[in-house]
Amino acid sequence: MYPYNRNTQLYGTRTRAKETTMQPDQTALLASDRRLEELLVLARQEAHQTARKFEALLHNTELAEAESILKTMYLDGLKHLRLLREVGFTIFGNTGEVEPAVEPEITADARTLLEELLLAEMDDITFYRDLLFAMPEEDLWNAFFQIITDKQNHTAALNHLYAKYFCKTSGN
């Protein structure tokens, strides 16, 4: 299993928003791309919703044994939000935050949430890969590599949890 609760970076973390080496003309080109800005807003909204779903699963008594796995995925979701804010700040000079709306409580059962999250995480891998390929600068790639790697690990973990809790085999 992936060591979710350990820092796996060899030389520590650095905040990309503060140490960009992008050329001014490249920054201006990216900053003028409204479609990119819309995609980053969409990515932040998706990351927020995913974190909320992981939090709902975390409080589900049916999956109490998997608390550490679910907590790690929830914390990864919060990390993704931070990374996306940093990318937005690097490109656009602001984090693009909007006032949080009052959101309804997630009432789906554990099986439904696991299914939704599994499918969403698989779709997100493709989405973030496309965003990665849209970035001309290596300074921005690290955030997307981290998110993609986490999403791949989440897919494997969610697959395991779904099989463990909801795929009962008969003794035939």
Image (tube, rainbow, N blue to C red):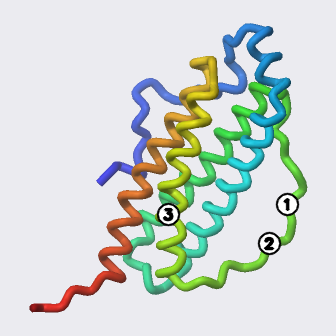
Closer to us: 85 or 124: 124
| Residue 100 lies in quadrant | bottom right
Question: In the visual, does 35 lie left or right of 135?
Answer: right
Foreground: 36 or 99?
36
Q: In the rendered image of this protein, does residue 26 appear above or below residue 14?
A: above
Question: Which residue occupies 79% across, 42% down?
Answer: 38
Q: Between 172 and 114, which is closer to the camera in this rendering? A: 172
Q: Is residue 86 left or right of residue 118?
A: right
The residue lying furthest to the left in this view is 172
Q: Of tags 3 and 2, which is closer to the observer? A: 3
Residue 103: image tag: 2
Name the residue type under label 1.
Answer: Pro
Left or right of 117? Residue 47 is right
Instruction: In this rendered view, identify the residue nearer to me: 166 or 123.
Output: 123
Crowd band around label 3 with a 10 angstrom C-alpha radius: few (<14), some (14–19), many (20+): some
Residue shown at 44% from the left, 42% from the top: 149
Q: Position of residue 74 (x, y in %)?
A: 55, 60
Q: Disc 1, disc 3: CB below 8 Å?
A: no
Q: Which residue is mark 1?
A: 100
Crowding at mark 1 (Cα within 10 Å: few <14, some 14-19, many 20+)? few
The circle on residue 119 is: 3
Q: Which of the image's four quarters has the C terminus? A: bottom left
Position in image of residue 20 (x %, y %): 68, 17
Mark 3 or mark 2: which comes first in sequence? 2
Q: Is the residue marked by circle 2 packed among few (<14), some (14-19), or many (20+) residues within 10 Å? A: few
User: In this rendering, is residue 147 above or below 18?
Assistant: below
Q: What amino acid type should be assigned to the residue bearing mark 2?
A: Glu
Query: Measuring 40% from the left and 51% from the top, which residue is drawn there?
Result: 153
> Residue at image x 60%, y 83%?
108
Earlier sequence position, callout 1 versus callout 3: 1
Asked whether the beta carbons under mark 3 and mark 2 sit within 8 Å of each other, the answer is: no
